[in-house]
Image: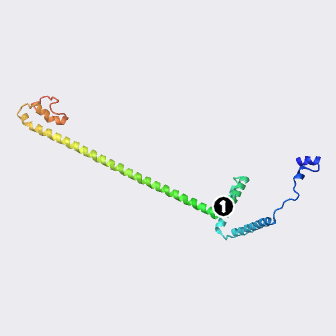
Amino acid sequence: MTEFTSRLFSADSLSTRLRPKEYKKLPESTLNATLRDIHDLIQYAVVQAQKLVFGEDLDKTFAAFLGFTTLYWLTKFIPPFWLTVMGVTSIFVAPLISSPHGRGVAHDASESAKELAEVAVEKGRRLAQNGKIKAAELSSTGKQSTADLSMNASGTASDLSGTVVESVRKLSQMAPEFDAGKQPDSDHLQNAVSPLSGQPGGEKTYPAADTGL
């Protein structure tokens, strides 16, 4: 609009003052190198397409088949714009992946993943070993507690049996008094049965024994 308005009022417009006297051109060497690169790229693409079609490299042939099949199904779900974005991204990413630097980065990533997996497995083994050790300690503690309880029970049973035997022995010593019709001494009778009641003799008074027993 500025150029159009300036030409209406004057022959010497603004763009005339800004125009160079001679327009610039691309250097012939650059143009020839660019055209040569385009020429080589076209020839390379034609040769590679023929190799894919005739199956010279089966890996590339199968990869191309999978790629075109995937593209065929993606066209039914993804808009053309996003397909174009994916295609351009693939064009730029593919050389980086196939380059030696890209393979080195992929190798380093795989090595790091292996190291992380080994560390995770080692930690799992240590946790499993610690769990086994804790389980063994708990088992031994339970066995020891069971053994202590059984020993205490056997000791208590032996004490009770000894107490009963002692009481029976004392009562047997007092049997002649019962046979003779005599009334036994209450202190002796209390001492004989006190081990069974768990009380010492003399703390509780028992009635006199019936002579009819």
Residue 188 screen position, x and y as percent = 11, 33
Percent across and percent down for residue 98 are 65, 63
The structure residue drawn at horizontal position 12% and vertical position 33%, both measured from the top left corner, is 189
Mark 1 lies on residue? 96
Colouring scheme applied when the structure was drawn: rainbow
Q: Quadrant of the C terminus?
A: top left
> Badge 1: few (under 14), some or many (20 or more) residues near its Cα, within 10 Å?
few
As drawn, 94 above or below 161: below
Residue 1 can be seen in this image: no
Give x and y (percent) for residue 114: 53, 59
Q: Which residue is rendered at x = 91% and y = 47% of the image?
A: 6
* Rendered location of residue 103, percent (x, y): 61, 63
131 is higher (above) or lower (below) than 36: above
On the picture, is 209 further left or further right than 9? Answer: left
Q: Is residue 120 left or right of residue 25?
A: left
Q: Is residue 106 left or right of residue 82?
A: left
> Looking at this view, is 22 or 5 the one in front?
22
> Vertical placement of 188 versus 155: above or below?
above
Locate residue 21: give its quadrant: bottom right
Query: In what element is the residue under mark 1?
Result: helix
Q: Amino acid at mark 1?
A: Leu
> Is residue 59 visible in the rendered structure shown here?
yes
Seen from the viewer's position, the closer of residues 24 and 189 is 24
